Image (cartoon, rainbow, N blue to C red):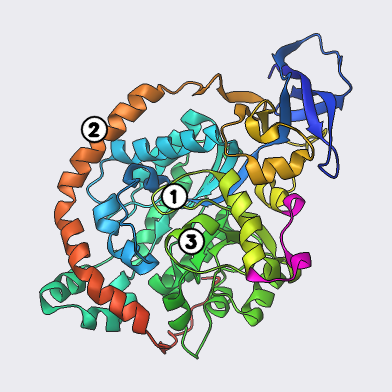
Amino acid sequence: MSATLLHGGQLLSDDGGSLHAADVLLRDGVIAAVGAPGLQALDAQRIDAAGCLVLPGLRNGHTHAHGALARGAVPDRISLEGFLAHAPALIGQRTLDDIRLSATLTAVELARHGCTACIDMAGELPSPSVEGILAVGQAYADVGIRAVIAPMVSDRSLYQAYPALTASLPSALRAQAEAFAPPRARELLAVLREAQERWPFDRDRVQLGVGPAIPLHCSDELLAGCGALAREFDVPLQTHLLESRLQALAQGGVESTVARLARLGCLTPRTSLAHGVWLDDEDLARVAASGATLVHNPSSNLRLGSGLARLRAWLDAGARVALGTDASNTSDGQNLFEATRLASYLSRVATPDWQRWIDAPQAFALATGGARVQAGERADLVLLDLAQPHYVPLRHPLRQLVFGETGAGVRRVLVAGRTVFADGRVTGIDEAALRQRAQERAAALDAACAPAADWAHSALPALAAFCCGAQPIAFPREPEQDPAS
């Protein structure tokens, strides 16, 4: 690979309180050198970084490729369970081209907002297909940012997970809820295995993981199988953990969700757990000890009324923590700058003890995975325009970045030393054509999914009443599964 020299830029001081001028040399996908202005590299392509702050790229710990094409379709006041009831109306009836289109929209938005890497729990209805999974991978490869794609799988529907919910539906709606039959565990695991075996992309850039959607919506057979696949192929596993009050109540008194994940081989250092809003102290300690990562998604937690995750408690417990945006339909964007700011701000309403609030350096470290602009690090970098209003006057660069940056200041994004966004556009992508195609397909999909949308809308009153009045639900433990099988 040819070398690239970013010259004339500014770097943050160790405490973030000031800037210093530096040139950054990129070679073979990593930062080869950081030096005083005037650093020489005769073989390097030169990029003018004057007036820009050079930062490590942001890392989005949780999103969904399918959300972009459903932007604006999620009703205004709706909980997680109401949102799940709308899933067939939001992502049903899609072609392979639609799946790739939605993933491309997601990847483009991530790049535009300074994200150089993400974990994406891509979804497909009625069930995931190898071709659909590969279509998502192709979208990320085309845009050029790093991604772990963890296809969502579940072998229980929302209504099978909550039988009392189904019983509470009006009789005219109940039959359709009971008729939905999700794919069986062995069928889903076969798809995931085939996708791993056929994966054509550079796994250092676009990797295929495993994504049991929600533990409550997965049988022991499916969870154990997902854990086994993650071990066999040495790939990440991501799932949603205790996102809503109802999921917490459904744990009953037999076995917690975290204990169940551990029993079935799904709680390891390769695991990441999105949300964790209703995680108690005992299970938090278990997560921290396992080396798994908790992913805080403040925007969607607020949008769906799921609650406030105890971010400070997570950090105090020694858990690994990342930040995520969630999908573009449930948090209405892929802006990790916004999630970083909210992670800090929401910690301030959780306690009056200001010494326990998440400060700007802590929030920034969560958004970047603690990466720094220094030799030996990956050449995944973002250039921010210091002429933006939120940096004028400039007193404390890091605070003004974390509390003021919206993504409008992103001028260039590089992944492995290659520019993927510059001059207001994502390189190699015809964004005008992408927007036009998205609008056309949105209209067609809305028409095709109208019956499913009408059904979900009719079910919402009963679903809302069930969720608001729910009491602890005891579910029997399934027969033991051997995680190694």
Point out the stretch of residues depicted in magenta: 350-362
> Which residue position holds label 3?
302
What residue appears at the point 42 percent right and 35 percent down from the top-left corner?
Answer: 104
> Which residue position holds label 2?
440
- Mark toward the start of the polypeptide (1 vs 3): 1
> Which residue position holds label 1?
64
Q: Which residue is outermost to the front?
A: 393
Q: Is residue 33 left or right of residue 144?
A: right
Q: Does residue 209 belong to the magenta stretch?
A: no
Crowding at label 2, few (<14), some or many (≥20) Cα neighbours within 10 Å?
few
* Discs 1/2, front: 2
Q: Does residue 352 belong to the magenta stretch?
A: yes
Q: Is residue 19 left or right of residue 284?
A: right
**C-alpha span from label 3 to label 2:** 30 Å
Q: Which residue is outermost to the top?
A: 42
| Closer to us: 440 or 419 | 440
| Closer to us: 127 or 454 | 454
Q: Which residue is outermost to the right?
A: 36
- Mark toward the start of the polypeptide (3 vs 2): 3
**C-alpha span from label 1 to label 3:** 17 Å
| Closer to us: 200 or 40 | 40
SS under mark 3:
helix
Circles 1 and 2 in contact, beta carbons < 8 Å: no
What residue appears at the point 37 percent right and 84 percent down from the top-left corner?
Answer: 470
Counting from the top left corner in percent of width and height, residue 347 is at 65, 63
Residue 5, visible in the rendered structure = yes
298 lies above or below 224 = above
Counting from the top left corner in percent of width and height, residue 374 is at 82, 34
Counting from the top left corner in percent of width and height, residue 215 is at 45, 71
340 lies above or below 422 = below
How many discs mark residues in the rendered view?
3
What residue appears at the point 68 percent right and 19 percent down from the top-left corner?
Answer: 1
